[in-house]
Image (cartoon, rainbow, N blue to C red):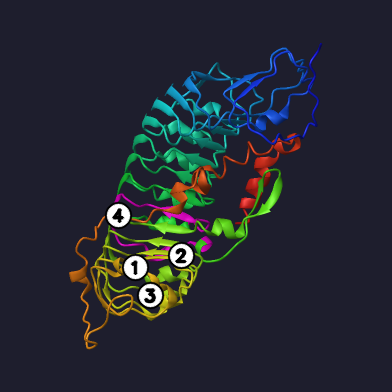
Amino acid sequence: GQMVLRVNPNWVPPFQLRLLQLGSWQTGPSFPLWLCSQKDLEYLNISNSRISDVVPSDVNLSRNQISGQIQYLPQSQVYFFVHLSFNNFSGPLPRISGNDTLAMVVLGLANNLFSGEIPYCWIKWQSLRVLRLDGNRVSGKIPISMGTSTKFQSLHLHNNRLHGEIPLSLKSCTNLVAINFGENELNGHIPGWMGHGLPNLIILILRSNKFGGNIPDHLCALTSLQILDLSNNHLFGSIPRCISNFAAMMFMNLLSVVMKGQFLEYGNTLNLVRLVDLSRNNLSGEIPQEVVNLQALQTLNLSQNHLTGKIPKLIGAMILIETLDLSQNQLTGSIPESISGMTFLSHLNLSFNNLTGIIPTSTQLQSFNESCYAGNHLCGPPLKGCRGSGKETDVKNRAKGIGKGREINWFYVSMPLGFVTGFWCVLGPLVFNRRWRTELWWKVYDLVGKF
């Protein structure tokens, strides 16, 4: 007899399959969209199924163990979202066959074993908005031709082996919202043109490269910036006083994004990643007083530099700070009393400076481990006592054995596809209703304008 599978078009199976054999089943005439919910498939057969529908516009084979090489991407104009991330694909990055351009909006090739250089044929990618090549073994320079893909909004090339400078041609990609070039071997200066050339930028991550020179003042023009991570480079000079121009770090706003086919409010969630990380550089001078104006900031890391002077007296005005790391600098003076007003503070590191005096009193400050204050001349709880109390404490003498390589285990690094590396990519494959497909990205980025 003939085998027939009848399910509601919007059915979502309450299970995940690894093997699915539906050959010669009458699953047509429509393409079974419920297959898109199966994330663990290793084998699929839907041959001879009387399907007469169009091919789905989104292809999601991510998070499997698929191996082999992808020599060419299809010329078909129907694939808008292609997700092949978190597999074992190897060899050079795929190219476009023929002379056609692609209508692709999202291309995810992250966390595979791709190697070689990034192809130079970006003139064919005029519709591409999100590109994820992170977590591979890609080498060479960032192609100048990448600047011809002017609709780019999210560009993730981190954790590869890229070298050279950031090409000036990317200045043409004025729609860019997120850039992550971290964990490469890029060098030269951080381009000042990013400040005025990329006005919509919300995320800029250039950590763990070989950038030198000063932090350009022009970056302060990025008033929508929420994440600035320039850590572990060779930057020198002072921290720009115009840092207070980062308006998105000064005020709490609400961002609505389209996800899973519905509107969700992400005010509190996105605020968790308002971050400035300038650690592990050669920065000098004082911490600018203007930094206290960033009252919506959650994380500030200035550790392992050569900063001098006092901690800003009004630092407690940054009432939403959860992580504050000023360790391994040459800061002097006392810990400001205002710091006791940081009621959300959950991680503090002031170790290995030249701070003196009594630790201010607050629930948070006394609850931290003594190592947070090591390498200074401080006293008072959680240390044993102050001079004159009969329990003198010189923290420098108590700091032996505490390593200087202490770093924050940043929460956004450990989040799978987190906001920094996957927020813009997860939108596409989660939306299966066809009427959303052609309008999805326009709606999302219209809303980003409200950020």
Identify the residue under disc 2. Answer: 322
Q: Which residues are magenta?
A: 222-248
Residue 122 lies, with reference to residue 363, above or below; the image says above
Identify the residue under disc 4. Answer: 280
Nearest to N terminus: mark 1 or mark 2 = 2
Q: Measuring from the top left, give residue 97's x and y in whole percent.
A: 54, 17
Q: Quadrant of the C terminus?
A: bottom right
**C-alpha separation, residue under disc 4 versus residue under disc 1:** 23 Å
- Asked whether 272 or 194 is in front, the reply is 272
Residue drawn at x 71%, y 47% is 262
Nearest to N terminus: mark 4 or mark 1 = 4
Query: Which amino acid type corresponds to the residue marked 2 in the rendered image?
Result: Glu
Q: Measuring from the top left, give residue 292's x and y in whole percent.
A: 43, 71
Identify the residue under disc 3. Answer: 366
- Asked whether 451 or 395 is in front, the reply is 395
387 left or right of 180 in image: left
Query: Which amino acid type corresponds to the residue marked 1 in the rendered image?
Result: Asn
Considering the numbered disc 4 on the image, is that residue within a helix, a strand or a loop? loop
Nearest to N terminus: mark 2 or mark 3 = 2
Mark 2, residues whose alpha carbon is within 10 Å: few (<14), some, or many (≥20)?
some
Query: Which amino acid type corresponds to the residue marked 3 in the rendered image?
Result: Gln
